[in-house]
Image (spheres, helix red, strand yellow):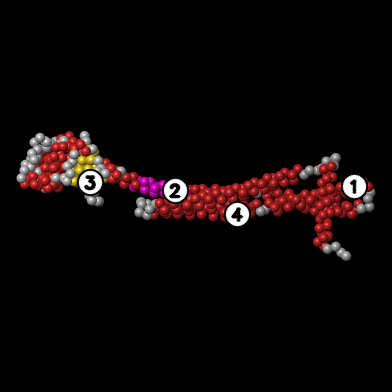
Amino acid sequence: MAEPPAQKSLFKKSVKAIARKREKLKQKMSKDGNYVDADFVELKANFEKQQNQAHRVVKDIQKYMKALDAMMQASKSLGDSIKTVYEPDWPGSNAAYNSITGLDVTFQDVRAKLTEHFAEPMKSYLGQFPDIKKRIEKRERRQLDHDRCKRAVEAARQKGSKRINELEDSYVNAQTEYDSINNEVYEVLPTFYDGRVAFYGQHFQTLYATLASFHETVAGTTNELAVTMDELFTSGSSMHEMRDRTSSDATSESHAAASRVGDYVGDAELEEFRDQAGADGDAEKVKTIDIEAAIGVGSTSSSDPLAALNASGTDEQTPVSLGAADAEPPTGASASASAASTPKADLDPTRIIEKRIASHPYAPQDDDELSFAQGAIISVVPFPDPEDEEDGWLYGYCDGKEGVFPANFTQPMAGS
């Protein structure tokens, strides 16, 4: 029964493989030494070096693409966060939104270009190496067949073997096959090795031209964002300075007014005058007089606040002296009016902690709060119930009334 073709072919390959291994062993053990093709050894070494370099470039470009993907995602996430914070009514909001969106598009574009013009060509280039490597291995096998047949012919000639003709025919066939693949390898390897210069030059140029365009676009977009953010900063700083200037002007005016009042009017004298004016039923006039006396408006002499206080009275009212010794208690109708406006509880001067002047008017938000106009003088006393004390609030008397008030609406009087 005939042997199947597949098994016969496998048997022949196994026989050849064994024969080649024996030939290699004989060459190693030969005392005469073996012929070494130095040119082929160099070509093979260059090929292996070229293959290793290509593998490294492909591996590193894959890492670069992964890093680019991570950077693209991080940039998009940061841009989304900035767009969330950047309110639509802020200066340059549309320009900022467009620039951030432009960055996302730029990252997507550069990734697509690098994939198409560099990563894919490098993979195709790397795919050529396995085919060339097979030719090199085939050439090595044919060389072993050639050497084995040559050794067999030489041995038969020495012994005068009858199989000399058969062995010579096998040697000729082995020689032909070896020469064919050897010529092919000598043609392919140098050409492929020298061609790496033009290949790498072209694709490296594409790589860095693409990256240069990418970085230039990113730099332009980020510069636009920097200009937009600078305008936002300038706008915010201007608003902050304006707010600080307004607050500073109000504070300076209050301090100056308090200083002028403190220089010319004693605390007890001013309180007594305000009680007398209130007794005549003109409480609103008292507030006006306090303010004008403090800032010097409407006075007959800018250097004499006492004259300003007297000048602010009505035609029927006798000029008021702020000296405590000159004050006389009202009689008759005046006494009745005075009794009607007297505070429910007398203010003990020993309870006064300090005196403050109102830097801003305050309208009460609750029944227990004290109202006053700008420039009003407020006597600060302890809270009736210490448990009612609260940060930022004080308890005081003003215009015959008492209650709590916000401390930041007043300023300490000079000398209080």
Q: Residue type at mark 3?
A: Gly
Query: Of the residues under marks 2 and 3, which one precedes in the sequence?
Result: 2
Q: CA distance from mark 2 to mark 4?
A: 30 Å
**Numbered mark located on residue 155 in the image:** 1
Instruction: Identify the element where label 3 is drawn.
Output: strand
Q: Main secondary structure of the magenta part?
A: helix
Q: Which structural element holds mark 2?
A: helix
Mark 2 or 1, nearer chain start: 1
User: Residue 27: percent from the left, percent from the top?
Assistant: 83, 44
Q: Is residue 64 left or right of residue 338?
A: right
Label placed on residue 120: 4
Q: Which residues are magenta?
A: 218-235
**Which of the marked residues, 1 or 4, is nearer the chain's N terminus?**
4
Q: Check residue 176 in the rendering and tell me which mark sits there, or answer none.
A: none
* Disc ID at residue 403: 3
Q: Residues within 10 Å of mark 2 (few under 14, many from 20)?
A: some
Label 4 to label 3: alpha-carbon separation: 83 Å
Q: Residue at (74%, 50%) from the top-left corner?
A: 136
Which residue lies at the image location 11% right of the left edge and 36% below the top edge?
324
Report the residue at 57% width, 55% height from top. Answer: 116
Estimate how packed mark 4 is, as few (under 14), some (14 to 19) or many (20 or more) residues with alpha carbons within 10 Å.
Answer: few
Foreground: disc 2 or disc 1: 2
Q: Amino acid at mark 4?
A: Glu
Q: Nearer the viewer, mark 2 or mark 3?
A: 3
